[in-house]
Amino acid sequence: MAPMIDVLLLLALPASGKSEIRRYLEHLGPRRSELHLGPVIQLDDYPYVHLMRRISAEQRRLRAPAAFFESEESPFADPRDWLALIHLLDEDFAGLGAVTRRSADPRSLLDRIEGARRLAGIGSSIAGGERQALEASLEADATELAGRLPTPSAAELRGATIVIEFARGGPAGAISPLPFPFGYQHSLAALSPEILQRASILYVWVTPEESRRRNRERAIPGPDGDASILHHGVPARVMHEDYGMDDIDWLMNSSLEPGTIAVEAGGDTHLLPFARFDNRADRTSFLRGDPGEWPPDAIATLHAELAGALDGIAIGRVDSPPAE
């Protein structure tokens, strides 16, 4: 029997079904073992993106330079912030099992973000003279983010599966390999060795056109939508410039071993077992509703398709040879 999956990178274009699958896993209970998963602990970079948009909105309100986004519709002003997000995930992963919770102090949170940006090669500070006013305006956001971060004990980590969700891409019409720092190639390489040595990848497959359609469909205006993993909408310009395509096919086809994605990081090559869950014909949107009303036939189809994909990943983690 294939072993449990230790770390699962859940990747896809926006609105492809990643967050819905995470919700299904939360409600699955003991049947997770049929998918080679233990109790699920979830990490996601979207709360940091939401916070960065809040920071930039406050900076514009204070008539200060916006560190991340020039407007509500803009992509990152410095695309290296895609890598800063990965460094924040690395830090969250490393903190799992720690005795203390993440601080809800906005000063500490801004310090964390600035530290992640330095690792990504961004040397400029988030805030200048408006730092104190910015911290005061972000108290509720910092508290909410700290409360959303999982805090499993060391005992709870044993036998658990850590699911890490993020989306990456490039402009519509771009050709892979994408330039630094865009796409999965560069974000995967920024993951810590501790993650790469343990990780497998499940990619949720929809077309860019379908991703854009579902993004419009799921979006709920205002804070209830923007802060939700199930109902937030990505700005149309960002969907076109940052998620108009992605490089997963190129990574899959150029890997050293079939069924893996090769990640070059720190002078090493990590072969991450890889599978695609085909969601081009929508199998996941029903999961946004009340779990008590999920159709049994839709659940059965979803479960069987996930099992097929995750079977290959679990076997691949054992059988995949080391890279030379």
Image (cartoon, rainbow, N blue to C red):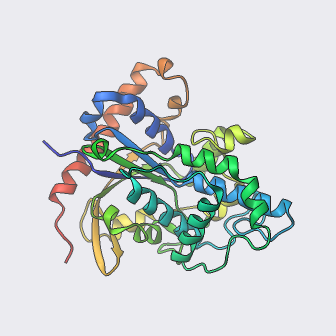
Q: Is residue 34 visible?
A: yes
**Viewer-proximal residue among 309 and 198:** 198
The answer to whether 154 is drawn above or below residue 94 in the figure is above
Q: Quadrant of the C terminus?
A: bottom left
Q: Quadrant of the N terminus?
A: top left
Q: Position of residue 235 (x, y in %)?
A: 70, 54
Residue sticking out furthest to the front: 100
* Residue 256 as seen in the image, left or right of residue 140: left
Residue at (49, 55) in percent of width and height: 166
Residue at (75, 41) in percent of width and height: 222
* Residue 316 as seen in the image, left or right of residue 206: left
The answer to whether 29 is drawn above or below residue 205 in the figure is above
Residue at (45, 57) in percent of width and height: 92
* Residue 300 as seen in the image, left or right of residue 127: left
Residue sticking out furthest to the left: 1
Residue at (76, 57) in percent of width and height: 72
Q: Is residue 170 visible?
A: no
Q: Position of residue 84 (x, y in %)?
A: 54, 68
Location of residue 21 by image quarter: top left
Q: Position of residue 76 (x, y in %)?
A: 66, 67
Q: Position of residue 65 (x, y in %)?
A: 79, 71
